[in-house]
Amino acid sequence: MDGSVASAEQLSAALLALEDQVVSDVEGCHAAAVEIERLAEPLNDEALLARARLCAASLRLRAGDVAATRAIHTLLEWALQHGDKLLQARAHNACSNVARLAGDSAKRLEHALSAVELLDGTATDYMQVSHRLRLAEALALNGTMDAARPRFRQAEQLARELGQWELLTVVLNNWAYNEFTAGEFARSEQVARRLLAHAAERGVELDPAYLDTIGGIQVENGQYAEAERTMRLCIERCEAGFTDNADDMAEYQLTMARVQRGLGEPDRAQESLALSRALCAERDLPEVMVRVHLEQAELYAARGDHAAAFAEHKLSFAAREALYMKERQARAQTRQVMFETAEAREEAERFREQARRDPLTGLRNRRYADEELPALITNDPDLVVAIADVDHFKRINDTLSHDTGDQVLVQVAKLLETGLAATAPEGFVARLGGEEFVLVLPATQVSAAISALDEIRRTVEEFGWHDITGDLPVTISAGVAGVKESGPRSQSAALSAADRNLYAAKRAGRNRVVAGTPPERRPRAYRDRDEP
């Protein structure tokens, strides 16, 4: 583009071409967005400049630059302040991707829902389809394929009606993949057949990634001969440069190994698997390597070498644990944003309910507690809050596994919720994060709350943990505080008082309920619960 003559209208059109396309060349598109941003700066068109910056930041994020997160959230704030609905929708869509990379499925769903709610008659055809696709994917990630399926169907129908043929390919591929990962192999095959029919009708040469999706579905449906043809074409196209991501070849060789094992050709399968393993080691692909170990175990078992299969399973477990820890450490918290609109309010509320649930335990989450507590504290002078914490939880994770730790959290959550319902049915339990929970008891005397929490504590202690943790005991400590005793009535004051009492319970030996600890003279820094 000739920067000396580029007008705001020309730059806007060039930017729209970047915003509304299925991006394959991320680096090239990012460079183009940065150039548009540079040319827009002297024009004093803030809206155009904000769009260019959001486009560039979104592409940076896709390229793996997590520092782009801050720019995306800043631009969302700008769009809100200036009432730019279309930019808000695009920013929410980008924030949904941020949350996906952060492993925060609730926030991913919330942002995806907001992006769809903000669509109106001024939204482009591409946005109408792509934002609904992002919402469908977020619902699928939350384990609700029954809710996701109508959204996928709506995105497919809109893509056909609006002539968004390239985007239709993405919709069908992603729908098939999500049905596949949900274990709905028959449904995934139906969608994959529509993808193949669409490609044939439109003369589309499917990218290797799409062919890999189809090949994996064919494997799970026992169609090994068809899968081999699909994967041969997939690998040929990858080698011919149909994709810019060379890391994908590790995935394709792994799928081919599964195909060849299904065909009863273990030697060829081993060759393909060795290629995948080498690429994983060369390019540092830990997630694929976990599945390489599992496939190697299957190959050993098929040959009757069960000792080697068991050893490979152990390697897979160790690799999975290392990957799990890496992902946990890499998670970044995104800022909490809520946007209400009148469109589809009833359906939106149902989705929002999912966004305010902890996906592991099913309890309310911290977002819900932050929304509900201020009003409860203001309106109920007899409200009691308690913070409960699983004792020595780190030891459970370290000694057994994080999967066992998750099982413990799920069971403790059930016991807390059941126990609270018997005492304060109008209250709620929420998981604050990690092994920490908050219990809210409306219209309750502190003495009654202490008795109720102590009964819950005993229930946790006496539960039959042996099948989950073996000889390791599971207990909880709790700090209880009435809002009247926490100075100025506020959420932070009430939770600080409960946290102070929890700390006293930990110092006193754990497995107990404490209330009434006087404030310390100096603020105490938040600490690891497993510290003495």
Image: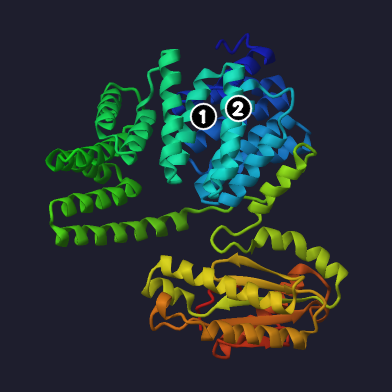
Q: Circle 1 — which element?
A: helix
The three-letter amino acid code for the residue at tag 2 is Val
At label 1, the amino acid type is Val
How packed is label 2: few (under 14 Cα within 10 Å), some, or many (20 or more)?
A: many
Q: Do the residues labelled 1 and 2 touch (CB within 8 Å)?
A: yes
Residue 63 shows up from this direction: no
Q: Is mark 2 on a helix, strand or loop?
A: helix
Residue in the picture at 34% in, 39% down: 221
Q: Quadrant of residue 374?
A: bottom right
The chosen color scheme is rainbow
Q: In which quarter of the image is residue 109?
A: top right
Q: Is residue 360 above or below residue 48?
A: below
**Where residue 73 sits: x, y (%)?**
64, 42
Can the viewer see residue 269?
Answer: yes
Decide which of 370, 262 is in the foreground and name it: 262
Q: Which residue is drawn at 82% across and 69% down?
A: 377
- Name which residue lies at 20% across and 61% down: 311
Where does the N terminus fall, quadrant-wise?
Answer: top right
**Label 1 environment density (alpha carbons within 10 Å; few <14, some 14–19, many ≥20):** many
Residue 92 in the image: above or below residue 369: above
* Residue denoted by label 1: 171
- Ranked by sequence position, the earlier of labels 1 and 2 is 2
Tell me if 349 is positioned left or right of 405 in this view. Answer: right
**Label of residue 129 in the image:** 2
Q: Where is residue 462 in the image (x, y as percent from the top left)?
A: 52, 86
Mark seen at residue 444: none
For the image shown, how many numbered marks are present on the structure?
A: 2
Distance between the alpha carbons at the discs numbered 1 and 2: 9 Å
Q: Which quadrant of the structure image shows residue 246?
A: top left
From this view, report whether residue 71 is shown above or below residue 195. Answer: below
